[in-house]
Amino acid sequence: MSICELLSAMPWWYYAALILFSLYYAVRGVVSEVVNYREAPFSKAQKVIIFYIQEFLFKIIFTASSFLSLAIAYKIFSSLQSLADISAGTAVLLVFLFVWGILGLSGYLTGLILAGKFPGIKGS
């Protein structure tokens, strides 16, 4: 199945949720940046270019990718004949897609990507 077929098979409410979650997290991210850089010695235009546009796009892309990963995971899972015959590669892919999707929908994916590690794990 191609990506176009996958996208055309998704119901309207999935697209509505994708748009709502993406916009919510994008606006939330920009508001957070406004609060964080309120006292920064930049002009308003510089703040928009340096911080706000990047945060908006970052949140939208990662939230949309999480919806897409859950759709792909659902399609793969529903195409399986039996869970007893699942290969290790398919299982790892399903777990990865599910974790990516859940982290994206909960809003923690961008923080995880920026940190480069899971929260609570001590780095060297």
Image (cartoon, rainbow, N blue to C red):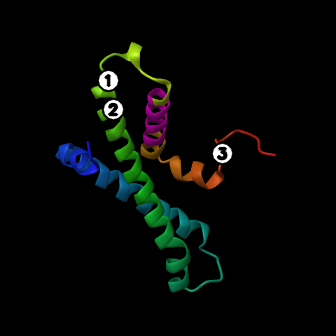
| SS label for mark 3 | loop
| SS label for mark 2 | helix
As rendered, which of 84 and 114 lies closer to the eye? Answer: 84
Q: Residue at x 34, y 39 (%)?
A: 72
Amino acid under label 3?
Lys
Q: Residue at x 49, y 42 (%)?
A: 103
Amino acid under label 2?
Ile
Vertical order, 97 against 24 (above or below): above
Picture quadrant of residue 80: top left
Which residue does the numbered mark 2 point to in the structure image?
76
Which residue does the numbered mark 3 point to in the structure image?
117
Residue 23 as seen in the image, left or right of residue 107: left
Indicate the position of residue 47 as horizontal and vertical percent values. Answer: 54, 79
Q: Marks 2 and 3, how far apart in space?
A: 27 Å
In the image, which residues are magenta? 90-101
Vertical order, 45 against 66 (above or below): below
Q: Kindly check if marks 1 and 3 are in contact, taking CB atoms under 8 A apart as contact.
A: no
Q: Marks 1 and 2, how far apart in space?
A: 7 Å
Placement of the N terminus among the 4 image quadrants: top left
Residue 79 as seen in the image, left or right of residue 27: left
Q: Earlier in the sequence, mark 1 or mark 3?
A: 1
Q: Residue at x 44, y 29 (%)?
A: 90
The label nearer to you, 1 versus 3, is 1
Counting labels gives: 3
